[in-house]
Image (cartoon, grey):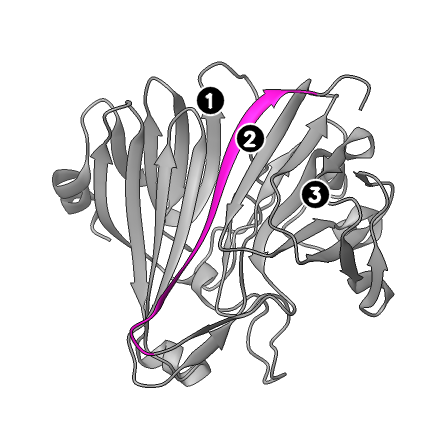
Amino acid sequence: MDIAQANEEFGIPGVLAICAGNGGFPLITVENAHARASVCAHGGQVLSYCPAAHDEDLLFLSRHAYFEPGKAIKGGIPVCWPWFGPDPQQQGRPAHGFVRTRGWRLLSTEVRVDGSTRLRLGTRDDEGTRADWPYAFALEIEVTIGADLELALTTENTGQEPFTLTQALHAYFRVGDVRQTQVFGLAEYDYLDKLAEGARKTQSGPVNVQGPIDRVYLDTSETLSINDPSLGRSIQIEREGSRSAVVWNPWVEQARNMGDFGDDEYLQMLCVETTNAAEDCVTLEPGAQWRLGSRYRLDHARENA
């Protein structure tokens, strides 16, 4: 992306600008009456969102995150596509697919009637992607920055044969103390416990995080909420096109083993992800589309949660 040309074509004076961010990656910055935010063209990834009435960012971004070609950025909302988790065919391809390490093109920007700002980025198949995954596709992410943060990831099968995918909006949320944080909306749902060899279990009550956690919740499309008494807030997560959700925190040992993550940062983050994962996979016929979406809203923390 040529930054000067992008500003000329897509910049919105006083609202949206494109600059060189960390690692030289093009960074789209937005500030309007509702919120301020930043989106990186590397991975088509939202890095920051802070509503005007709040001091703390909604999202967590590791202070050790890599901003290097070919590497994923640890934090914000990475796009996992066209598979979630390890390479499903065990061919040595990168975990969580290949689009989170690609440069995305800025397609459009606009100011909406309500004062929110909407931008679209996209990426398509090429010779490199077809070497890893032999299908033709067009992938777009629409980001709306207003009183809420809205994301919509749309996949189109532009080829001549069907394909099946799993995917995620892999949101990293900033929390005050994950040990005091609870996730509501998943009680009585089954989940696959990836720390117990994928054993199927049933959630009892809210999700509490007192150690490493890596779970895929099944057959759920309900609104979820993260109750964060340390910061005095609740994060509401509305989902579209999803019947699964992932909750993840690496905890002490895994945090120490990640070069792009601080040893103590696990206390200030929690991933609650909008997904098509496990048995919730998507098959697209030629010409078909699928939209995976989330709306994130900040509210006051629940009392006596």
Q: Secondary structure at mark 3?
A: loop
Quadrant position of the C terminus in the picture: top right
**Circle on res. 215:** none
Label 1 – label 2 distance at C-alpha: 8 Å
Image: magenta residue range: 286-301
Position of residue 130 measured from the top left corner of the image (x, y, whole percent): 38, 82
User: Label 3 belongs to which residue?
Assistant: 262
The residue that label 2 is drawn on is 58
Q: CA distance from mark 1 to mark 3?
A: 26 Å
Q: Is residue 205 above or below residue 15?
A: below
Question: Which of these two is toward me, 84 or 47?
Answer: 84
Marks 3 and 2 sit apart, C-alpha to C-alpha, by 19 Å
Percent position of residue 39, x then y: 39, 41
- Which amino acid does the dot numbered 2 rest on? Leu
Q: Nearer the viewer, mark 3 or mark 2?
A: 2
Identify the mark nearer the N-term, 1 or 2. 1
Nearest to the eye among marks 1 and 3: give it. 1
Left/right of residue 59 with respect to residue 187 in the rendered view:
left
Q: Pointer 1 and pointer 2: residues touching (CB < 8 Å)?
A: yes
Query: Going from the N terminus, do you reach mark 1 or mark 3 first?
Result: 1
The image position of residue 142, as x and y in percent, is 34, 47
**Residue density around tag 1, few if under 14, some if 14–19, many if 20 or more, within 10 Å:** many
Q: Is residue 100 left or right of residue 19?
A: right
Residue 291 falls in image quadrant: bottom left
Question: SS class of the residue under badge 2?
Answer: loop
